[in-house]
Structure formats: structure tokens, C-alpha cells
Image (tube, rainbow, N blue to C red):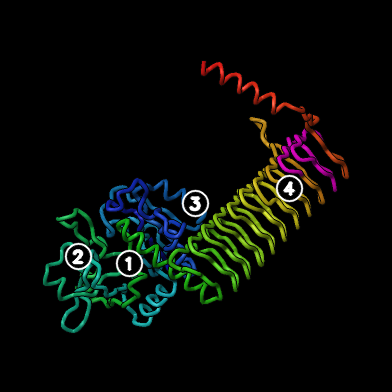
Amino acid sequence: MNLNVVILAAGRGKRMNSLVPKVLHEVSGRPMLQYAVDAVKTLKPQKTVVIIGNGAEAVKKRMKAEDHLSFVIQKKLLGTGDALAIARKELKKGSVLVLNGDCPLITTGTLKMLLNKHKSDQNMLSFLSFVDNSISGYGRIVRNENGSVVRIVEDKHATPIEKKRFNELNGGVYIMETEVLGYLNKIRKNSFSGEYYLTDIVDIVAKAGKKLEAYNGPPEEIRGVNTREELFKISDMLRKRIIAKWMGKGVTFIDPDTSFVHPLVSIGKDTIIYPNTYLEGSSKIGNNCIVYPGTRINNSILGVGVIIKDNTVIEESRIGGGTVIGPFAHLRPHSTIGRNVKIGNFVETKKSSIGDGTKASHLTYLGDAVVGRNVNIGAGTITCNYDGENKFNTIIESDVFIGSDSQLVAPVKIGKGAYVAAGATITKNVPAGSLAISRTKQQNLKGWAERKRKVQKSRSAIVRK
């Protein structure tokens, strides 16, 4: 089958009450439109056209990575029938699949089912339907006494009798042959809304005596998003679907209702995910990891057996197997952490690589640093990487011991096996095997405390007088 795809994504989304185009509102970290694009991609269409209008430039910018898409702008938002008519000149010869850009739960499997039934039944027009008495706003499919589809009446125009009699709803996903596109010119502007409804094509095709049919599909997949409440409900349905998939693959969720996993995340077997955790972007979590509560991991890779303790943030970083991070740690972008490393509480890294076996257990900042193996970073250590205009690197070679409350003023290099005394401010390179000390000599002033007490007592006496 030579297939064209048209995705309708021009609507204003008035009920979203937002400055953001409706199809760019996110579901599990991705714009709604992305889900429709992904669902049709594996069908390998010869052409995919996205109809845009409201916020057209913003939509193009957000979807720029999908370079196979063609965009057509609907300058005047005159309805779905008008949108498809505008797209005709962009389509190649063959069947046309039409779907909405605000249905993020639609799957390739359901689309294949529709395409296969359309082909096997040799229809001119086929579309998805569903039954759900709990919702409203969807067009009602009208069938005659023989059970044949004769038209679709929009919900807002349906009479109470029609709403009661016809409970089969329009799913808004169509597959049609090229001949049907010619009937678009026969659609008339609705006198109430001033729009051209694509649903009217059903009545026109039926009256022309052409073969058509509606096929029941999964209600949860076909449901669209028109309000913030519906956005939440769809997001929650997708979240539950994703978590159920990973539990089926051997991942333990202590409380699935409070964990969030984005669609492109992968999780290894026997990993345990605690409550209030967020696994975002395209993060990859290895086998036998533990992610404790309050953690957010974004676009990062965790090796086997990594432990992420409570309230830790990890962004665009890589962590080797057996490493322990947190609690209350922050790995900023481009942090590469080796194997069996300890990054403890209130430790922050940024654009740094940390060698195997190194420990920074608490209260430390490592920015623009290259740290070797088996290094001990004492509490309160800071790499002073910024002079107000430029960033500089700090190099700490393997087997170094950095004492607590040290400042390493970059650019600076600490040689292999060297020691830095506690409280040092290091501004020059430290040779391998050396001890670097940078602090004033300690003085003990005998009797100072007693003299201080006498002065205070004397001042108090004067005040009382």
C-alpha cells in the first residue's frame, strides 16, 4: 500500500487556556504531536504532512529533528475538512491516513489494524470508532437499520434523541483512497461554527454509494486532549502503561502511583524504584540498581548495581557500576563518574570526570575537573573554576588525598599520590608525592581567654553605673 499520512495539528486549543500550541503540551516529557509522529513512522509512509496553524513556528522548531515531516500552514482555522483540503497538493498517489495530533496514546498496532481491515474489506473510506459513555464531545456515528454507517453528527449538534440512541463515537482516525479527497469540495461550511467538518465526508461518501465502515478501536488510545484535566488523565494513563511494562520485565516499583518514567527510558532487571522518583528523557538504568525516594534522573546512564540515595538530582551524566550517589547530591550535565565511586551528601559535580574508587563524601563542589582513581576529597573542598570571565580546569591525578576545606584555584594540577593539607588554598601545581600546605602558622596565646573575661566584666560594671 502506497501510504500518505496527514496529521491535523492546527487547532487553537482554546479550552487549554494556554499560550502554548495545544499539540506542544507535554505528556511524559514529550509533546503530544511527537506520539502521533512516532505511531505512524513505523508504517513507513511515503509522505507525512503535518497541518499547523496556531503557533506554527513554535511547532516547526520543536519538531525540527523530524526532518522527514512536511508542514502545511492552515492560515485561517476553518476546520478539519478545510485542513485536509489544503494538504491535498502535498500528497503522493495512494491511500491517505488522517489522524489528530492530540491523541498521544494511539499505537502503531491499532493503526495497522485499521489499515488491514480497510484493505481486506476493500473500502473507499474507513475510520476508528469507540464506545465510552463516560465522556462527551465526540461525534456520534449514525447507522441505518441495516447497521451501515450513514453519517457522523458532531456532539454539539446532536439532538438528545441522537445522543441517547447512538453511543458509538468517532475516533477521528481515517484511512481513505485518493478518490475520497475529491469529495472534500462538497463539504459545506457549518452555519453554526463557520467551519468545514471532515466528519461530513462520511455522509457524502455514503450517499455516493461508496463502501465505508467504522471499526471499533481501544477507547483509551483514541481519546484526545482538549482540556488540562484531559491532559492529566491521558498523562496518567500513559504513565501507568509504561510502569506496567517495566514491572513485567522484572523491575520493582515500591509505589507505582508516585513514580514517573518517560517513554524512552530503559530499566534493567531487578532494579528497585522507590516512591516519588522521576526517570526522564532517554535515561538508561542498569540491572540491580536502587533508586531511593525524591530522585530525578534526566538523560543519564547508570551502570550495574548503582545506588542513588534520597533527594538526588542527576542530569546528562554517566555513572559506572557499583557507585553510590547521594543523598542530596547534584550531578550537573557532563559529569562522568567511574566505578565504585562515592559521591555523598551535598556534593555537586559539573562537567567533570571522576575516576574509579574515588570518594567525595560530603559538602564538595567539583566543576570542570578531571579526577583520577582512588582519590579522597575531603569535606568542604571546592574547585575554583571561574574567574568571573572564563572557566578553567582542575586536574587531580590518582591516589591523591585532598584535606577538608581546601580550595583548588584553577588552572591547577595535583600530581599523583600528593597530599593537600586541610584548609589549604592551592594556586600552583603540586608535584607528585608532595604535601602542599597553604595556611598561616598556628599561634596559641596563653591566658587570652581570662583577659577577655576581665575586659567584659569591666565593661559590664561601667554600664551598671
Residue 155 bears which disc, if any? 2
Which one is in front in this view, the residue at disc 1 or the one at disc 2? 1
Q: Position of residue 447 (x, y in %)?
A: 74, 27
- Residue 217: image quadrant is bottom left
Residue 196 visible in the displayed image: yes
Q: Earlier in the sequence, mark 4 or mark 2?
A: 2
Q: Residues within 10 Å of mark 4 (few under 14, many from 20)?
A: many
Q: Earlier in the sequence, mark 1 or mark 2?
A: 2
Residue picked out by circle 1: 223
Q: CA distance from mark 4 to mark 2?
A: 67 Å
Q: CA distance from mark 1 to mark 2?
A: 15 Å
Q: Position of residue 308 (x, y in %)?
A: 60, 60
Residue 377 bears which disc, if any? 4
Answer left or right for 343 relative to 281. right
Residue 279 bears which disc, if any? none
- Residue 133: image quadrant is bottom left
Residue picked out by circle 3: 64
Q: CA distance from mark 3 to mark 4?
A: 43 Å
Of helix, strand and loop, which mostly describes the magenta segment? loop
Residue positioned 87% across, 40% down in the render: 431
Which one is in front in this view, the residue at disc 1 or the one at disc 4? 4
Q: Residues within 10 Å of mark 3 (few under 14, many from 20)?
A: few
Q: Do labels 4 and 2 touch, CB within 8 Å? A: no
Q: Quadrant of the N terminus?
A: bottom left
Which one is in front in this view, the residue at disc 3 or the one at disc 4? 4
**Image vertical order of residue 128 relative to residue 309, above or below:** below
Answer left or right for 286 relative to 26. right
Instruction: State the extent of the magenta-drawn residues as a range.
Output: 403-429
Residue type beneath disc 2 = Asp
Farthest residue to the bottom: give it: 146
Mark 3 secondary-structure assignment: loop
Residue type beneath disc 3 = Lys
